[in-house]
Amino acid sequence: MRFPFRLLSFLFVFSIMSCQAQVNEKSTAEELNTSSDLPPGHELYGYENGNNPKNEPGLEIRAWTNDIHEDRSGLMWFGTKGWGVIRYDGDTVVYISTEQGIAGNDVREIAEDKDGNLWMGTDGGVTKWQNGTITNYTQNDGLVNNDVHSMAMDSKGLLWIGTSQGLSTYDGNKFTTFDLPETESDSVNFVRSTNMVHSIMEDSKGNMWFGTNGGAFIFDGKSLKNISEEDGLCDNTVKSILEDRNGEFWFSTQNGLVCRWDGTAFTKVETARDPYGSMASADLFEDSHGNVWLPIEGVFMYRYDGDTLQKMFEPQGCISHTLRCAYEDSKGRIWFGGWNGLYRYDG
């Protein structure tokens, strides 16, 4: 179904999440040095910390932010929880929700194809944004389930879509269900099925990786391999997967655990623990300098430069507890999204 696009721009107030008590940092399994001091002249800008000297509209966004993407024309897109997708051109903030025709207001992932079309994974299906024209795809069109949690466009132009009930691919003409084998349920962590696909990634060799409730799966185009706790993975509920520039793989998990795999062995990266037990690792990210960012939702944001694991933004108080996704734009600025909206770091 197609909808004409209408602009809707408005202000809203998003309730401020309470700060959690700060906790002490543990040393890592690699005995990494830690630090919390920002380099001189480097600041985190955002509404919540009162640091927006130029009154940039994009830094006034306070919606829970799930994902961040800059399109080829330089427009910033922010997928939010409950408010649809937000578009920012540097001057104007535009909110696009189900009222304008997108499939759902919980926009969890944004991907861009080779033609510059945007694809949005939502709680109501997949939305294609083509120069302002909206096309939605749901189970009625062959999508395995409407509750989309992850998406990735591979190097061949195939769109991979992870949902709470399985995995689909879309080749531009039809949806195909991609079956993942069921693994044993985990009653302790209330994990019932591998079908929940939290993350999708293509590595440098063209292999597809899927983070699920049953560990990580690797698909080489022919066969599927599972990596789980039995192989040394720190937790079976894999929320995010990253391949760094050195070819090593990072995994963030539901219980706030992060580990690194060199293709042979796993190394656990110890981070601070939340004394209240409410914690999950969020989207891993590598910046243009090779720093790996580790958001531990509900605890802290960490940055690893290859030698030092640094606790970031600690002087900002509860802000460091709320960040869950990161993205570097074409100007080298790093945007962070989380519970309290958007922030930007000048690096």
Image: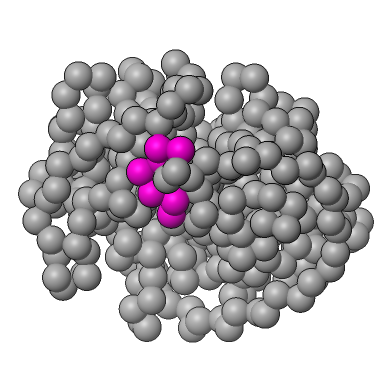
Q: What residue is rendered at 31% in x and 51% in y? A: 165
Residue drawn where x is 74% and y is 52% of the image: 100
Residue 127 x %, y %:
59, 42
Q: Position of residue 162 (x, y in %)?
A: 38, 44
Q: Which residues are magenta?
A: 141-150
Question: Which residue is pictured at 76% across the width and 47% down the height?
Answer: 87
Residue 299, percent across and down? 46, 70
Q: Nearer the viewer, residue 268 or 116?
A: 116
The location of residue 315, given as percent across then percent down, is: 63, 70
The image shows residue 282, relative to residue 292, as above or below, that is: below
Asked whether residue 3 appears in the rendered view, the answer is yes
Left or right of 146 on screen, residue 59? right
**Left or right for 36, reference 266:** right
Q: Is residue 43 above or below residue 91?
A: below
Asked if residue 47 lies in the magenta stretch, the reply is: no
Quadrant for residue 80, please give it.
bottom right
- In the picture, the quarter occupied by the N terminus is top right
Secondary structure that dominates the magenta span:
loop
* Residue in the foreground of this view, choosing between 37 and 272: 272
**Taking 250 as reference, is 267 left or right?**
left
- Tell me if residue 293 can be seen: no
Dividing the picture into quadrants, the one containing residue 235 is: bottom left
Foreground: 274 or 184? 184
Specify the quadrant of the image occupied by residue 15: bottom right
Q: Is residue 281 above or below residue 48?
A: above
